Image (cartoon, rainbow, N blue to C red):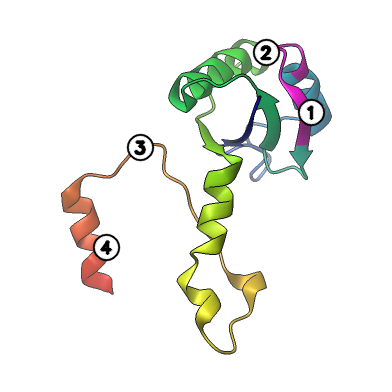
Amino acid sequence: MQTYISILRGINVSGQKKINMAELKALYETFNFKNVRTYIQSGNVIFEYKQIDPQKLSKQIEQIIAPKYHFEVSVIIRLANEIEHVLNINPFLTKNNIDISKLHVSFLSETPKQIDIDKIKILD
């Protein structure tokens, strides 16, 4: 079994695309996902499942959600060890006087185009 984190994009924001986390947990459990846990009303779900391509898994979850809630939700999947790695390599943790409660990370559903990466590098 592999531990996955699914991040449902754009749900429960300003009353849009509302999904109750207890219902979402139950929905995940009907598809043989194990040890399902949700985090507040965020749309973040931790669960265990057989090893499968994360992209394929995200599409499966999107197809589970759409007919039940009558709207589409983009789902990003990350492995638990990927999240741990991101936390461990955070360059800001080596800085003095950093309030770690103010640090954030964003995950993209696909690799950005090089031209977009270059635009961000200019801001550095």
Q: Residue at x 48, y 64 (%)?
A: 89
Question: Is 32 left or right of 111, judged from the image as shown?
Answer: right
**Residue indicated by mark 4:** 120
Does the stretch in magenta take in 23? no
Question: Is 58 left or right of 121, judged from the image as shown?
Answer: right
Contact between marks 3 and 1 (CB within 8 A): the answer is: no
Circle 4 — which element? helix
Frontmost of labels 2 and 1 is: 1
* Mark 4 → mark 3, Cα distance in angstroms: 16 Å
**Rendered location of residue 121, percent (x, y):** 24, 66
Q: Which amino acid type corresponds to the residue marked 2 in the rendered image? A: Lys
**Residue indicated by mark 1:** 35
**Rendered location of residue 102, percent (x, y):** 61, 72
Give the extent of the magenta segment.
Answer: 29-37
Does the stretch in magenta take in 31? yes
Residue 106 position (above or below residue 59): below
Q: Residue at x 54, y 20 (%)?
A: 62
Crowdedness of circle 1 by 10 Å Cα count: few (<14), some, many (20+)? Answer: few
Checking the image for residue 110, the label placed there is 3
11 and 124: which one is in front?
Answer: 124
Residue 9 position (above or below residue 114): above
